[in-house]
Image: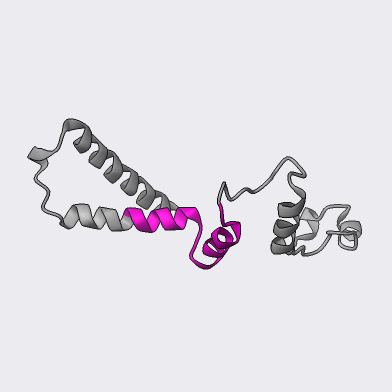
Amino acid sequence: MRPYMMSPYSAFLGNAPFGGAVTQAFEFWSDWFDQVGQIGLINIDIGKTDKPDLEREILNEVGSYGRQIGQIADAVAILLEKAALDRTKLSDEEIVALHKFREMVDHIDNCKKNY
């Protein structure tokens, strides 16, 4: 860090609690909050499920909900692109739904490119 950018408190904060690198064992806290319940303003909830341990394992081993939904969206987009749909047999609402889905997938792809 450049000397002119250093805080006058940096010497103190470097030795204070949490002044250096801080790591947390989130699994410990997650298990503890499961037992205790809501503690503060920010809480992480995996939702209502009959098998929270299985849900947690899937999130840890497979991927987040966003990753799972993203892979499903990618697969559906490929199927829609490759399928020979007779759109004359689709209602206006169904065609609109397909267009909205395609727009959503395109928007997500643009967000990924810009991130």
- 106 inside magenta stretch: no
In the image, residue 89 above or below residue 23: above
Q: Where is residue 59 in the image (x, y as percent from the top left)?
A: 54, 61
Q: Position of residue 33 (x, y in %)?
A: 73, 52
| Above or below for 43 versus 65 | above
Please give the name of the residue rendered at 24% of the width and 57% of the height, measured from the top-left corner: 78
In screen coordinates, is 34 left or right of 68?
right
Q: x and y percent of residue 72 in the render?
A: 35, 56
Give the quadrant of the N terminus.
Answer: bottom right
Q: Nearer the viewer, residue 108 or 58?
A: 58
Q: Position of residue 28 (x, y in %)?
A: 74, 63
Q: In this view, does 13 lie to the left or right of 57?
A: right
Q: Residue at x 68, y 46 (%)?
A: 43
The structure residue drawn at horizontal position 51% and vertical position 57%, both measured from the top left corner, is 64
Foreground of the two, 80 or 102: 80
The correct choice, above or below, for 21 with respect to 73 in the image is: below
- How many numbered discs? 0
Residue 68 placement: quadrant:
bottom left
Q: Main secondary structure of the magenta part?
A: helix
Q: Give the range drawn in magenta.
A: 50-73
* Residue that lies at the very extreme toward the front in this rendered image: 50
Outermost residue toward the bottom? 61
Q: Which colour scheme is used?
A: one colour
Instruction: Say whether residue 76 is left or right of residue 21.
Output: left
Residue 67 lies in the magenta stretch: yes
Please identify the quarter of the rendering in which residue 24 is found.
Answer: bottom right
For image coordinates 35% across by 45% down, the residue present is 107
